[in-house]
């Protein structure tokens, strides 16, 4: 979470504004009071859990979850102290559906993958993380009475996209378009590597608009737009309000 960067940005722009407030350049800078009118967005969990899956047992990762959500709470509280009042908080997506987590899966045991080909246990951990996050958001609402805090169920939006990819005219949601990924040979996007003594280049996507993930980790612009369209209307938020009303405290 880029809290330090925010603090630096606020301090520098406030200082600059005071220097040019009587000139036309002042219109290019936020005023001090604008920071209390902004909508602060958070998106967390994917990197924390993805790294955890590689380096920790599920029990260790589960034990670390309270600390992760408390870091989010500390960041929100800090911004609140700096004048922030509206917060839009994304939960984490279905990490078990990231193609990178399936690159080296071969002959999975029964029940290892779900009906859409995602790693079932990883998605279950993501759901557990989201439950803890939602509980922490509820506590934040009680602790910060002047704040408008919206919890956004990005998990449901992304899983809905993945499960309906075919009906939406998209490519296999577990495939990627950037890089070279054939069998168990993987050359990452923009890199070169050897496959059977032949140099291979991980080329860019020819048509990223039909892929959900372009590199196995990150969602494509088209996928992110779909997720935004299905969350910003308030159908997957708590409270159920569109993003245009997220700055209004209920």
Image (spheres, helix red, strand yellow):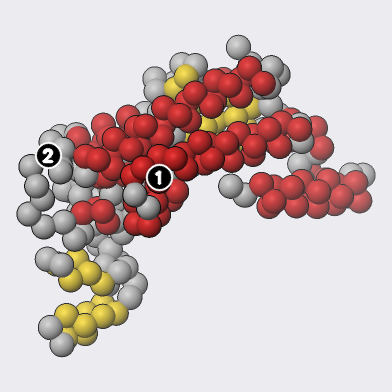
Mark 1 or mark 2, earlier in chain: 1
Instruction: Tell me where residue 39 sits by quadrant.
Output: top right
Q: In this view, does 118 lie to the left or right of 229?
A: left
Q: Please indicate, yes or no, whether residue 245 appears anywhere in the rendered image.
A: yes
Task: Say which residue appears at 7% left-offset and 54% top-offset.
Answer: 107
Q: Name the residue under label 2.
A: 111
Q: Position of residue 159 (x, y in %)?
A: 27, 35
Q: What element carries label 2?
A: loop
User: Could you say where residue 33 lies in the image, as x and y percent from the top left?
Assistant: 80, 32
Residue at figure coordinates x 60%, y 12% from the top left: 250
Q: In this view, does 185 lie above or below 231?
A: below
| Res. 223 visible in picture | no
Q: Is residue 134 left or right of residue 208?
A: right
Give the Cα separation between the discs numbered 1 and 2.
21 Å
Q: Is mark 1 on a helix, strand or loop?
A: helix
Dot in front, 1 or 2: 1
Q: Tell me if 143 is positioned left or right of 43 in this view.
A: right
**Does 25 appear above or below 137?**
below
Farthest residue in the top direction?
A: 250
Answer with the quarter of the image where residue 217 lies.
bottom left
User: x and y percent of residue 182 in the render?
Assistant: 14, 67
Depth order, front residue of 20/1: 1
Residue at the spot 27% in from the left edge and 56% down from the top edge = 100
Question: Mark 2 packing: few (<14 Cα in 10 Å), some, or many (20+)?
Answer: few
Query: Residue drawn 64% across and 27% down?
Result: 86
- Disc 1: CA contacts within 10 A as few (<14), some (14-19) or many (>=20): some
Location of residue 145 in the rendering, given as x and y in whole percent from the top left corner = 69, 17
Q: Name the residue under label 1.
A: 61
């Amino acid at each position: 979470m880029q809290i330090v960067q925010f603090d630096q940005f606020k301090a520098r722009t406030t200082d600059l504004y005071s220097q040019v407030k009587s000139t036309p350049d002042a219109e290019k800078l936020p005023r001090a009071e604008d920071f209390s009118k902004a909508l602060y967005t958070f998106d967390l969990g994917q990197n924390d859990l993805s790294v955890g899956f590689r380096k920790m047992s599920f029990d260790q990762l589960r034990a670390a979850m309270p600390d992760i959500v408390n870091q989010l709470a500390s960041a929100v509280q800090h911004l609140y102290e700096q004048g922030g009042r509206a917060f839009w908080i994304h939960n984490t997506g279905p990490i078990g559906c990231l193609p990178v987590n399936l690159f080296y899966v071969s002959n999975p045991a029964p029940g290892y993958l779900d009906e859409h080909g995602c790693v079932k246990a990883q998605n279950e951990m993501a759901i557990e993380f989201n439950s803890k996050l939602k509980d922490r958001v509820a506590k934040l609402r009680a602790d910060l009475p002047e704040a408008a805090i919206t919890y956004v169920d990005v998990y449901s939006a992304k899983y809905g996209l993945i499960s309906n990819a075919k009906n939406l005219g998209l490519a296999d949601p577990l495939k990627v378009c950037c890089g070279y990924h054939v069998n168990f040979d993987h050359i990452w996007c923009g890199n070169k590597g050897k496959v059977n003594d032949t140099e291979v280049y991980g080329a860019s996507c020819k048509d990223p608009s039909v892929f959900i993930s372009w590199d196995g980790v990150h969602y494509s612009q088209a996928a992110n737009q779909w997720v935004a369209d299905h969350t910003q209307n308030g159908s997957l938020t708590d409270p159920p309000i569109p993003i245009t009303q997220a700055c209004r405290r209920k």
